[in-house]
Image (tube, coloured by chain):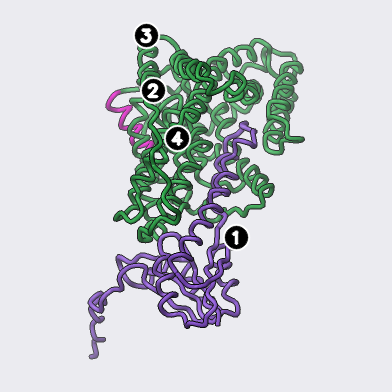
Amino acid sequence: MGRVRQAGEEVGLSTGVAETVSVLMLLTALAAAVIRPWGWPEAVIAVPAAALVVVTGAISPVRALDMMKRLGPVIGFLAAVLILAQLCQEEGLFRALGDWLARLAKPGRARSSIRLLAGVFAVASVVTAVLSLDATVVLLTPVVFAAAARSGARPKPYVYGCTHLANSASLLLPVSNLTNLIAFAASGLSFTRFAALMAVPWLAAVGVEYLVFRQFFRTDLNAPPAPAPAAPAALGARVPVLVVVVLAATLAGFAATSLAGINPAWAAAAGALALAARALLRRGTTPREIWRAADVPFLLFVLALGVVVAAVTGNGLAGVLQRVMPSGSTWLALLATAALAAAAANMINNLPAVLVLLPLAAPAGAGAVLAVLIGVNIGPNLTYAGSLATLLWRRVLREHDAEPDIGEFTRLGLLTVPAALLVAVTALWAGLTVIGG
Amino acid sequence: MTVIIWVVEGTWPACIDAGRDLAPADARIVLLHVTGGSAPAAAHGAYAGLLGRGRPDRDPGPLVAELGAASARDLLEAAASRLGRPCTTQERHGRVEREVVAAAEGAGLLIVARDGDDARLGPKSLGPASRFVVDHAPCPVLLVWPRETPSTGSMPPPPPRPHHR
């Protein structure tokens, strides 16, 4: 991702002052994202914070522009995926998935709770990989809960499964997680090579989660299949064949564009466009709803955060981190890189963590970049204690008068995350050794 | 006398059957269901972890809570119809095991299903929540098997006699 220690040379501002300004702005942007004063979108604070680091000279306009140019295609890609997921929802894809899960675990069928768990893991892993973790959290979780309730199962293991897999199953494709999109742009890997190197780590991480869940929730999963509580609703949701075809074509398009040297974001845009055109023609949606699905304030927030983080790393943080950052692509170096990334993701959040760590990992090669991704993607399941997410979580729960069970969440995280990190990194290392970085 | 039947997903039919067959004819039967907040809380938490997507209307937590309330109503309704005797229903929210103990205050009998590891019978064939309820219930507890009761053959061989020198 190019040079990282240069702001001080380019600008008149002393490095100390520049670093202080940048760090303050980063903290302000992150704090605003947590507190959301007056319900403002996060961008309302983050964009002026980015402007301020440029105006004060903490980052030169050239470097700020450079960062935005690099993030531009990333957020375009992100917008296309967000729209794609929303349209899949409107076309009934998630409803059909819920019905499939409920059929899989028909009440009264032997081992239906465990069949349902396997089904939820399969569906959540694929949805996360193809339509990104946002789709799993926002669109799939309620559907899974409903499927569990319909089949008379206890819903907790399945809901926890969705929340965990949204993170740990987001390793496979560049589109699976915003962190991947950012790293993908910096890694120099092709879409297919990224997927080839991450396929086994993805399967390994999901496998570890599954084994731990089977054990951790054995009481709930062991409950015998009970009759359906309500009159069973008709399980006849039509599978939206066209949506599935468009998604498959989009995936093929990712590979094809990547091989042809074109940015795969265009394939995502084409897929989103195809579904949007159809939905608009059939009056299933409005341009306004599509615009809302793209979540422009979020895209602006990512862009602004990128500039602020570039100012922070450019003014000294990079130098500090470079000393603790492992170099090389031995198994141990990859593991240490992933562990460092997981720790950073837990301390703040995985989005700023990946922005900070990428420029440091990139010179060590694709292996190090992917190890950072394993850390920042699996890491957030570890614990919410002390992290930005916990603060957010507590705030949201207070608003809804709900009670967090942080102890249980943390125990589950302690059982899954270190093991998943270990097997995923080992799989990555083996992949790098066999097919090369 | 009040008989409380703790209705839990998966194991409730056995408790209902026991209540129908064993509760005295003049007993006041209460069907109790407790919704723990952990599923909506987990959904809220996952959305909170997505930094920057500050659109509260997309948070899946409230929808999960709503679905949970609906499924609890359905469950109690199905339980009442299986019971086939006059009864009242009670829905509580909070820490499941504590709410059950609190609800059993003053009751004559609490009917609970075993819901632990029944592949290996032993101390762990009671799950953590039912273990807590059995330990702290302020009234007699009737513990029923959610499946066929095991035969006496399920007992492990007796431990070896202590070796005396």
Task: Tell me residue A359's x, y (percent).
Answer: 53, 22
Image mark 1: chain: B
Which element is circle 2 on?
A: helix
The quadrant holding residue A4 is: top right
Q: Determine contact: label 4, label 1, CB under 8 Å.
A: no
Q: Nearer the viewer, residue A270 or A422?
A: A270
Which element is circle 4 on?
A: helix
Q: Is residue A2 magenta?
A: no
Chief SS of the magenta region = helix
The earlier-in-sequence mark between 2 and 4 is 4
- Residue holding disc 3: A260
Q: Residue at x 50, y 71 (%)?
A: B132
Q: Determine contact: label 2, label 4, CB under 8 Å.
A: no
Q: Determine contact: label 1, label 3, CB under 8 Å.
A: no
Mark 2, residues whose alpha carbon is within 10 Å: few (<14), some, or many (≥20)?
Answer: few
- Residue holding disc 1: B93
Task: Tell me residue A38's x, y (percent).
Answer: 77, 35
The magenta stretch is A424-435
Q: Are marks 2 and 3 on the same chain?
A: yes
Q: Determine contact: label 4, label 3, CB under 8 Å.
A: no
- Residue holding disc 2: A242
Amino acid type, mark 3:
Ala
Mark 4, residues whose alpha carbon is within 10 Å: few (<14), some, or many (≥20)?
Answer: many
Of badges 2 and 1, nearer the viewer stands 2
Amino acid type, mark 2:
Leu
Distance of label 2 from label 1 (alpha carbons): 43 Å
Of badges 1 and 3, nearer the viewer stands 1
Q: Are marks 2 and 1 on the same chain?
A: no
In the displayed structure image, the side of residue A359 where residue A32 appears, left or right? right
Task: Tell me residue A386's x, y (percent).
Answer: 62, 46
